């Protein structure tokens, strides 16, 4: 076990996961495909976000209720 490596990996995982939190439209669950302003949404990004939410909850990166809200917004859109 290497605590320094583990901390770096956790930070990388959290930063990667935060993409979905920062680039998802909370009203409809749509996720933009790239970080650039004005970039279109992508069904692939939406699908990946839906798969990532439960992992984010399990890792403590987001609250379960927030994951439920985003998932329901996506499915209702």
Image (cartoon, rainbow, N blue to C red):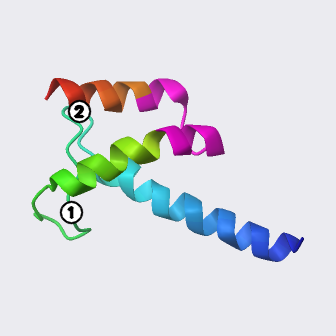
Mark 2: few/some/many CA within 10 Å (<14, 14-19, 20+): many
Say whether residue 64 is magenta. Answer: yes
Query: Which residue lies at the image location 55% right of the left edge and 32% below the top edge?
Result: 63
Label ID, residue 33: 1
Front-most of 15 and 6?
A: 6
Q: Main secondary structure of the magenta part?
A: helix
Mark 2 and mark 1 lie on one chain; the one further toward the N terminus is 1
Badge 1: residue crowd in 10 Å (few <14, some 14–19, many ≥20): some
Q: Residue at x 64, y 45 (%)?
A: 59
The residue to which callout 2 is attached is 74
Location of residue 69 with respect to 14 vertically, above or below: above
Q: Residue 27: horizontal and vertical position, in percent?
A: 21, 31
Question: Which residue range is magenta in the image?
Answer: 54-67
* Residue 58 in picture, x, y percent from top left: 62, 39
Dot 1 falls on a residue whose secondary structure is loop
Q: Residue 73 at x, y = what percent?
A: 24, 27
SS for callout 2: helix
24 is within the stretch colored magenta:
no
Question: Is the residue 62 above or below the residue 41 in the image?
Answer: above
């Amino acid at each position: 076990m290497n605590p320094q490596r583990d901390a770096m990996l956790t930070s990388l995982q959290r930063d990667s996961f935060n993409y979905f939190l920062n680039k998802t439209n909370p009203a409809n669950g749509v996720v933009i495909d790239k970080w650039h302003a004005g970039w279109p949404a992508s069904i692939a990004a939406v699908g990946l976000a839906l798969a990532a939410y439960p992992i984010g909850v399990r890792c403590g990166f987001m609250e379960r209720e927030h994951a439920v809200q985003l998932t329901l917004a996506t499915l209702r859109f």
